Amino acid sequence: MTAPTPSTTPPTLLQSIRLAILVGALFFGGAIWWLRRESPPPHPADLGALRFAGYGLWVVVLIVLAFVRGVFTKASMYARRSALLIIAWAAAESLALFGGVVWFLHGDSRWYAAGMLFMLAVFILFPVVRD
């Protein structure tokens, strides 16, 4: 009986995943801009509890990224490092998507812009690894 070999993710696949995350978030923002360009947001500008959920999400994502960064630097297997990259990118994407929801519901695009800038910063801090 032979032991299964760990699967490796080629760098081109990781680049495709990162591009899909970026394009998906940009498309989501473009769709919200298209929907909000002439119609007012369905809710008033006061975010209420959604503001605290947003702050909580930012804190959780920062904690997750700090943990992933620590594990990433110690990981030696390429497959593990690839999985950690995808986790980091998805965590950062959640901020942009949450910002898009806030923009759609309340008309405040600052949350989306901050999430997109943070996502781009995470793409720089967690680049595609080579074997």
Image: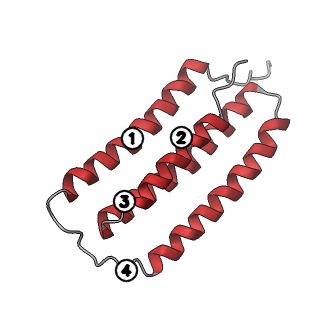
Above or below 78: residue 92: below
Secondary structure category for the residue under label 3:
loop
Question: The disc labelled 1 sits on which kind of residue?
Answer: Gly
Q: Taking 69 as reference, is 131 above or below it?
A: above
Residue that label 4 marks = 46
Quote the CA–CA distance across marks 4 and 1.
Answer: 27 Å
Callout 4: helix, strand or loop? loop
Query: How far is the residue under mark 1 from the one under mark 3?
Result: 17 Å
The quarter of the rendered structure image containing the N terminus is top right
Numbered label attached to residue 24 = 1
The residue shown at (62%, 23%) is 9
| Amino acid identity at mark 3 | Ser
Q: How crowded is mark 1: few (under 14 residues within 10 Å), some or many (20 or more)?
A: some
Q: Which of marks 2 and 3 is nearer the N terminus?
A: 3
Query: Which quadrant of the figure contains the C terminus?
Result: top right
Residue 51 location (% of width, % of height) = 48, 74
Disc 2/disc 3 C-alpha distance (Å): 17 Å
What residue is shown with label 2?
Answer: 120
Mark 3 crowdedness (10 Å alpha carbons): few <14, some 14-19, many ≥20: some
Between marks 2 and 1, how big is the CA–CA gap? 13 Å
